[in-house]
Image (cartoon, rainbow, N blue to C red):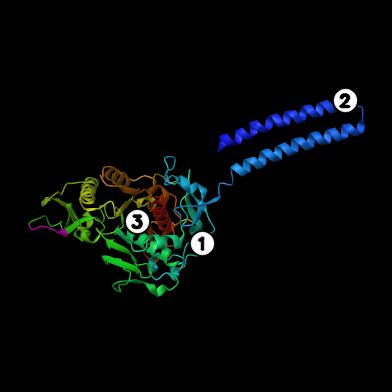
Amino acid sequence: MSGLYWDVCSYLRPVLKRVQKFIKFLAANYSKSSTFQSITALFMVGSIICFLVVMGSSYFYMFPSSEAVVEINGNGDKNSSKSSQFLSNECNVFDGNWVIDESYPLYNASQCPFAEKGFDCLGNGREDEEYLKWRWKPKNCEIWRFDVRVVLEFLRGKRVVFVGDSLSRTQWESMVCMLMTGVEDKRDVYEINGNEISKQIRHLSILFERYRFTVEFYRSVFLVQPGPGPKHSPKRVKAVLKLDQVDDINREWIDSDILVFNTGHWWTPKKLYTMGWYFQIGGRMKLGMPISSAFKVALATWRSWVENTINPDRTKVFFRTFESTHWSSGSRQNCKVTKEPALKVKGRHKSPMSDAIMNAVRNVSVPVQVLHVTPMGAFRSDAHVGTWSDDPSVPDCSHWCLPGVPDMWNEILFSFLLTH
């Protein structure tokens, strides 16, 4: 397009030169007339202005505003023209920054029956609302803007499954609340077993009856199989993680259309060793194995399961990386939630667990898309639950308020699905 613009410029330059020559000819023959001199000056100025107008008009005709709208996927939904660059070779959607967008939030958590009260910060007394107005913007492209009607039709007849820990459940709740904004009769959306949302339940499934699709969550915080401590093991061993076996609930994940994994927050000394959890491979205890090594073995087991079980022609697989936390000085008791995103990430944009996840996915023989959300969350010291939960006495700088950061994870997820 830029070449065409300069072709027009080169075509118009000779025209201007001819006009200038004609003016000089008239000026040479009639320069004695003061009246003509005035007319000539006006004519010259007018010619230059006309030339600039033509050049400017041609430019804006060929290069409309970068915010121009286009249709994608033939669905008639309109998004930024930069969406055509989404996930191109020039675009890393996870490299960007947060910008204010007054069209956010996408929903009201107090009006969504599937959002946990503990994540509804505004409903729990948070007074400032600026944290709700931030949208993630990649540097070299745009994320497809969420259009609930398009997404509901896209998901018709499908099965969406989230597998992981409480951060996975938060993303699941976020997606359900986002989708409910497009449903007229809320009674058409319900948990198929009549279960209430809770932290410990292993399986939750929300049916969107009119569209015949489900959005499900399976609690599997390690992805591999937990079990009791073996006989004759040391007293400190209360339970084991069988690193060479995928969680036995995995058979429920298989026949899904969209499958989203996460793990990480339970792979810590406090969650494991303090509670008496240790590792086992091939029936043998690995008491001295570092958590980082065990995590990589578990990911290798997950990778093997995906390669041998998942049908890539049906199931689109995603793995979300470790989510940034903002505990001060590493203390789980010092949680200071800011009013605006942090200007400096202080190393939170990187995580050894995220690196291990990306390395594992890199070697999978079937397509798996990484949702590398670690850098995004590193800025959002303003978006954690803090003390605005159902238990204010327990501060929380790990989980996110809803609406909030998990909504952006889902917008990116839908971007991957709808632009391919």
Circle 3 or circle 2, nearest the eye: 2
| Amino acid type, callout 2 | Asn
Circle 1 or circle 2, nearest the eye: 2
Magenta-drawn stretch contains 190? no
Query: Marks 2 and 3: in contact by CB < 8 Å?
Result: no
According to the picture, the residue beneath numbered tag 3 turns out to be: 332
According to the picture, the residue beneath numbered tag 2 turns out to be: 29
- Of the numbered discs in the image, which one, if any, rests on residue 129? 1
Query: How far across and how far down the image is residue 253, in percent?
Result: 25, 59
Residue occupying the point 31% across, 59% down: 162
Mark 1 / mark 2, whichever is N-terminal: 2
Q: Measure the C-alpha gap from mark 3 to mark 1.
A: 25 Å
Residue occupying the point 89% across, 27% down: 30
Neighbourhood count class around disc 2 (C-alpha, 10 Å): few under 14, some 14–19, many 20 upward: few
Circle 3 or circle 1, nearest the eye: 1
Write down the region rendered in magenta.
227-231
Query: How far across and how far down the image is residue 282, in percent?
Result: 11, 50
Query: How far across and how far down the image is residue 334, in percent?
Result: 39, 56
Q: Where, by quadrant of the figure, is residue 172 drawn?
A: bottom left
Looking at the image, residue 249 sits to the left or right of residue 416; the answer is left
Residue at the extreme left of the image, as rendered: 232
| Amino acid type, callout 1 | Glu
- Which structural element holds mark 2? helix
Neighbourhood count class around disc 3 (C-alpha, 10 Å): few under 14, some 14–19, many 20 upward: some
- Of the numbered discs in the image, which one, if any, rests on residue 349? none
Mark 3 / mark 1, whichever is N-terminal: 1
| Amino acid type, callout 3 | Arg
Looking at the image, residue 370 sits to the left or right of residue 181; the answer is left
User: Which image quarter holds the N terminus?
Assistant: top right
Q: Measure the C-alpha gap from mark 1 to mark 2.
A: 73 Å
